[in-house]
C-alpha cells in the first residue's frame, strides 16, 4: 500500500473544529467550506433521520487534487450545520489513491454510501471499483465491493456511482469512457446474485466529449433528467464556456431500451465560472441540488490556495422541470437567514442609474422594468474592483464580466436569456462568491470572487436610457451556523 498521507481522524477532526469559523476575509459565510484543504464534489447526499446529510470530496493535506477523502456535515434546515468531520478516507489497496465521488442512500434505516475506490499500481495503471459502506458514528465503515471494474470495452475512467429506482429495483448510473475515448453513462441493475451491467444508456448526443463524470438520473413525474458532466466538449458563443460542463438532458429514460428517449438538447445547469459535479437528493418530492463551486484544471483561478484552502459548495437549490427546462431556486429554508430588521426596499422610477451599499452578506431581489433601455447592467463594486452583469436586450444575452477583478479567474461568460420587459434577479452576495438566479430560476450563475480588500460591496445599476422602474428588496443575511 502506498497511501501518501496518514489520515488520523481524531487529529484532523480536532484541527477542523479549531479552525471554525474560518477567519480569513475571503472565506464565505453562506457556503460550506473547510478551514484548510481542497474541497470538490458534493457526495452521498441523502435525507436520513431528520437531517440532510452532505458529504464532499476533500483533501485535508493541501490544495492539490490528491488524497481524496470524504468530509461530512448535516443540517435540518440548511442554515445550521453540524461541525464537519472526516468521514471516509483511503485506507486499503482498493482505495489507496482516493475515495472518489459517490452517492448516499437509506437502507434498512441505515445511511449507506456507495463510492469509487481509486487505485494506481506501480506502473500508474488505474483501477476503479465501486464499494458500499455504512455511516456509523461519524465514519464510513467500508463494506462490499459490488463492481470490481469496468466491463470490457471501457477504460478505468469508471466512477461516480449514483443510485436510482426503476420499476421497483435499484439501479446505478456510472460515469464512463469507452475504449475509443467517448464519454458515456453505464447502467447497472441490482439482482439477487449481484449487480449486472446493462450497458451504456444511449442518447442522441454525438461526439460529446471523452469522459462523462458525476451522472445523476432523476425522475420528474413523466419525465426523466440525466444530469452529467461531459469533458472535452468545445465552447460555443453562448454556452459551454467553461473547460468542463455540468448539465442535463430531459426526456424519457427507458432502461428496457437502454436509451434516453425523445430528449432535448444538452443544457447547462449554471452559466457562471465556478460550477461543476452537482449532485441531487430527493426528499418529499423536492429535488435538492448541491454543486461544487469550483472547476477542475483551473487551479490558478483560486488564489485562496495561498491561505491553505480552496473551494466551497454552492447553496442548496431546488430543481423543477418546466417544458423540458430545469429551473433552480435556492431552498426556501434560506429565507430564515434574513435579518428582518435590515429589510430595505429598493424603489426608483425613470432613472438610468441607482446605487446602494450592501451588507457583509446580502440577499437581493431585483425587478428591473427596462422601459426603453437596450442595455441594463448590475455591478458589484469592491473598491476599485468590480463584477458586472450586463443584459443586452436586443441580443437577449446576459454577460458576466469578471475582468474587473484583480485576483482569481477573470474573463467573461455569455448566455442567452429571455427577458421581455422585466429583468428579474435574485442574488446571494457572500464574501468570496455571488450566486445569481435569473428570471425566477430559469438560469443560474455561480461566480467565485477574490476581492483584494474586505470591504462592503456597492451595487450599481445603470442603463443606456432611463429604466421604467427599479424595484426590489435587500436583506442582510446571517452566516450559516
Ligand atoms: C469530478 C471528479 C469525479 C471524481 C472526483 C475525484 O470533479 O473528477 O469524477 O470522482 O472528482 O475527486
Image: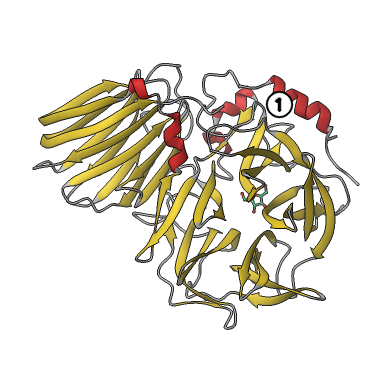
Task: Give the camera-side residue of 355 and 192.
Answer: 192
* Left-right relation of 243 to 197: left
Does label 1 point to a residue whose CB lies under 8 Å from ligand 1?
no
Please tell me which residue is depicted at 40% across the width and 44% down the height of the picture. Answer: 445
From what the image shows, is residue 236 above or below residue 300? Answer: below
What x and y, as percent, mark residue 132? Answer: 78, 57
Q: Quadrant of residue 305?
A: top right
What is the image's colouring? secondary structure
What x and y, as percent, mark residue 43? Answer: 65, 48
Helix, strand or loop under label 1: helix
Q: Quadrant of the C terminus?
A: top right
From what the image shows, is residue 137 above or below residue 379? Answer: below
* Left-right relation of 426 to 105: left
Task: Give the camera-side residue of 34 and 233.
Answer: 34
From what the image shows, is residue 65 above or below residue 143? Answer: above
Please tell me which residue is depicted at 45% across the width and 16% down the height of the picture. Answer: 454
Please tell me which residue is depicted at 49% across the width and 42% down the height of the picture. Answer: 274
From what the image shows, is residue 299 above or below residue 458? Answer: below
Instruction: Look at mark 1 in the image and give the residue it sits on.
Output: 16
What x and y, as percent, mark residue 116? Answer: 74, 56
Please tell me which residue is depicted at 52% across the width and 50% down the height of the picture. Answer: 289
What x and y, as percent, mark residue 319? Answer: 45, 54
Residue 449 appears in the figure: yes
Amino acid at each position: 500500500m502506498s497511501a501518501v498521507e496518514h489520515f488520523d481522524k481524531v487529529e484532523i477532526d480536532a484541527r477542523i473544529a479549531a479552525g471554525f469559523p474560518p477567519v480569513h476575509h475571503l472565506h464565505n459565510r453562506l457556503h460550506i467550506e473547510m478551514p484548510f484543504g481542497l474541497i470538490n464534489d458534493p457526495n452521498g447526499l441523502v435525507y436520513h433521520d431528520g437531517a440532510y446529510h452532505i458529504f464532499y470530496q476533500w483533501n485535508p493535506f493541501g490544495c492539490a487534487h490528491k488524497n481524496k477523502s470524504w468530509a461530512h456535515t448535516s443540517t435540518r434546515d440548511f442554515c445550521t450545520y453540524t461541525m464537519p468531520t472526516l468521514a471516509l478516507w483511503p485506507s486499503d489497496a482498493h482505495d489507496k489513491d482516493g475515495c472518489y465521488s459517490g452517492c448516499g442512500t437509506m437502507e434498512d434505516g441505515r445511511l449507506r454510501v456507495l463510492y469509487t475506490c481509486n487505485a494506481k499500481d506501480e506502473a500508474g495503471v488505474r483501477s476503479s471499483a465501486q464499494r458500499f459502506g455504512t455511516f456509523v458514528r461519524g465514519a464510513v465503515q467500508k463494506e462490499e465491493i459490488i463492481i470490481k471494474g469496468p466491463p470490457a470495452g471501457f477504460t478505468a475512467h469508471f466512477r461516480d456511482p449514483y443510485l436510482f429506482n426503476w420499476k421497483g429495483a435499484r439501479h446505478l448510473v456510472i460515469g464512463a469512457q469507452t475504449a475509443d475515448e467517448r464519454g458515456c453513462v453505464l447502467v447497472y441493475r441490482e439482482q439477487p446474485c449481484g449487480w449486472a451491467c446493462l450497458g451504456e444508456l444511449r442518447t442522441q448526443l454525438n461526439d460529446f466529449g471523452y469522459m462523462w463524470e458525476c451522472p445523476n438520473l432523476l425522475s420528474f413525474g413523466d419525465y426523466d433528467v440525466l444530469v452529467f458532466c461531459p469533458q472535452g466538449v468545445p465552447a460555443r458563443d453562448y454556452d459551454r464556456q467553461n473547460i468542463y460542463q455540468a448539465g442535463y438532458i430531459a426526456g424519457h429514460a427507458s432502461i428496457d431500451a437502454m436509451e434516453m428517449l425523445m430528449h432535448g438538447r444538452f443544457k447547462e445547469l449554471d452559466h457562471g465560472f465556478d460550477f461543476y459535479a452537482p449532485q441531487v437528493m430527493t426528499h418529499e418530492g423536492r429535488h435538492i441540488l448541491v454543486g461544487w463551486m469550483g472547476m477542475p484544471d483551473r487551479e490558478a483561478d483560486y488564489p485562496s490556495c495561498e491561505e491553505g484552502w480552496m473551494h466551497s459548495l454552492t447553496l442548496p437549490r431546488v430543481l423543477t422541470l418546466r417544458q423540458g427546462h430545469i429551473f433552480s431556486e435556492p431552498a426556501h429554508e434560506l429565507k430564515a437567514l434574513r435579518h428582518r430588521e435590515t429589510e430595505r426596499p429598493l424603489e426608483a422610477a425613470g432613472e438610468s442609474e441607482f446605487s446602494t451599499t450592501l451588507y457583509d452578506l446580502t440577499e437581493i431581489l431585483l425587478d428591473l422594468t427596462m422601459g426603453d433601455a437596450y442595455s441594463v447592467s448590475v455591478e458589484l463594486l469592491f473598491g476599485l474592483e468590480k463584477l458586472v452583469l450586463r443584459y443586452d436586450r436586443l441580443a437577449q444575452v446576459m454577460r458576466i464580466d469578471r475582468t474587473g477583478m484583480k485576483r482569481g479567474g477573470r474573463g467573461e461568460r455569455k448566455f442567452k436569456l429571455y427577458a421581455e420587459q422585466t429583468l428579474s434577479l435574485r442574488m446571494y452576495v457572500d464574501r468570496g462568491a455571488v450566486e445569481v438566479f435569473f428570471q425566477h430560476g430559469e438560469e443560474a450563475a455561480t461566480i467565485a470572487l477574490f476581492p483584494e480588500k474586505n470591504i462592503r460591496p456597492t451595487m450599481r445599476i445603470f442603463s443606456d436610457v432611463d429604466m421604467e422602474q427599479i424595484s426590489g428588496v435587500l436583506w442582510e443575511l446571517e452566516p450559516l451556523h
